[in-house]
């Protein structure tokens, strides 16, 4: 099982590096710049920082545990910011809607911090084990809800941005698995099998997200390309009708 876990993790590293290299070499920016920055941060933390600390201090060390959970919070915050960027892209032609959504997202983040701080007020001596872990889990569940609402919003707006829809679906995969595992750990009161499941479920969901993003950014046709392909067909149909 250990070798399987290692193989999955290195597969995630390769996907992160490959997708990041594709975006850089193709010099893609604009709408995918937030994705590029997120992938760069993910690769630095997950592919460089954590293995380096693990190699230096060992898996059971306090230093690795602190580094792992603190970087997990940082990655969840980065995911939240990426969700915000996706909302901005979805509302690109609806500025009034974006102004409302921007305020709502800010309020949601403050609410998550407040709820997590309230749990700390009952356990002052557990800053790491209580506040940080609970804040990370609360924000994770919040991101799952937000990404679901974003997908519904995209469908309601009738957006032709297929790339954005696939990027959002990828993030949904990333959030759904670990969120379900967090709930299972809570319901089973920390049973060993529920905690051990995260070792496989987290990287597998990240791999699913990256594969979906690969399809969205490398193979999926862009709306402009689709429209460009349709215009000549319309012109030919108009010419044929005039000749008839």
Image: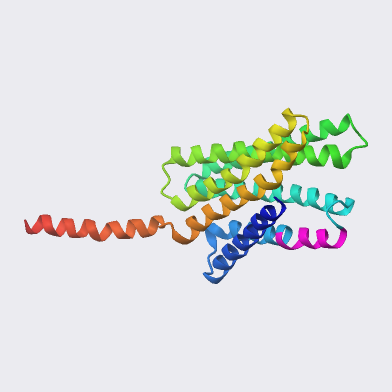
Q: Residue furthest right?
A: 125
Is residue 46 visible in the rendered image? The answer is: yes
Classify residue 108 by image quadrant: top right
Q: Residue 217: x and y, percent? A: 49, 59
Q: Residue at x 7, y 59 (%)?
A: 243
Question: Toward the viewer: 244 or 104?
Answer: 244
Q: Residue 91: x and y, percent? A: 51, 45
Identify the magenta region.
47-57
Answer above or below: position of 110 versus 74.
above
User: Any magenta on residue 191?
Assistant: no
Q: Residue 209: x and y, percent? A: 57, 50
Answer above or below: position of 22 versus 188.
below
Q: Residue furthest bottom?
A: 25
Q: Residue at x 67, y 56 (%)?
A: 9
Answer above or below: position of 77 versus 58.
above
Q: Residue furthest left?
A: 244
Question: Toward the viewer: 58 or 211?
Answer: 58
User: Any magenta on residue 56?
Assistant: yes
Question: Toward the viewer: 29 or 1?
Answer: 1
Please tell me whether the stretch drawn in magenta is mainly helix, strand or loop.
helix
Answer above or below: position of 241 versus 127.
below
């Amino acid at each position: 099982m250990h070798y399987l876990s290692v193989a999955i993790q290195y597969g995630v590293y390769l996907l992160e590096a490959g997708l990041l290299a594709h975006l850089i070499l193709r010099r893609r920016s604009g709408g995918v710049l937030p994705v590029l920055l997120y992938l760069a941060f993910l690769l630095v933390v997950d592919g460089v920082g954590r293995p380096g600390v693990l190699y230096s201090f060992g898996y059971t060390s306090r230093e690795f545990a602190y580094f792992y959970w603190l970087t997990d919070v940082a990655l969840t915050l980065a995911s939240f910011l990426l969700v915000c960027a996706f909302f901005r892209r979805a509302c690109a032609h609806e500025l009034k809607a974006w102004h409302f959504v921007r305020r709502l997202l800010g309020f949601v983040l403050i609410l998550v911090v407040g709820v997590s701080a309230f749990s700390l007020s009952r356990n002052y001596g557990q800053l790491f084990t209580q506040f940080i872990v609970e804040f990370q889990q609360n924000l994770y569940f919040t991101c799952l809800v937000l990404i679901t609402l974003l997908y519904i919003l995209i469908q309601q707006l009738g957006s032709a941005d297929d790339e954005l829809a696939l990027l959002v679906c990828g993030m949904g995969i990333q959030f759904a698995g670990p969120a379900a595992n967090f709930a299972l750990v809570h319901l089973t009161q920390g049973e060993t099998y529920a905690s051990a499941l995260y070792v496989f479920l987290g990287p597998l969901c990240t791999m699913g997200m990256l594969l979906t993003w690969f399809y969205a950014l490398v193979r999926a046709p862009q709306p402009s390309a689709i429209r460009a392909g349709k215009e000549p067909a319309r012109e030919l149909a108009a010419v044929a009708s005039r000749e008839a």
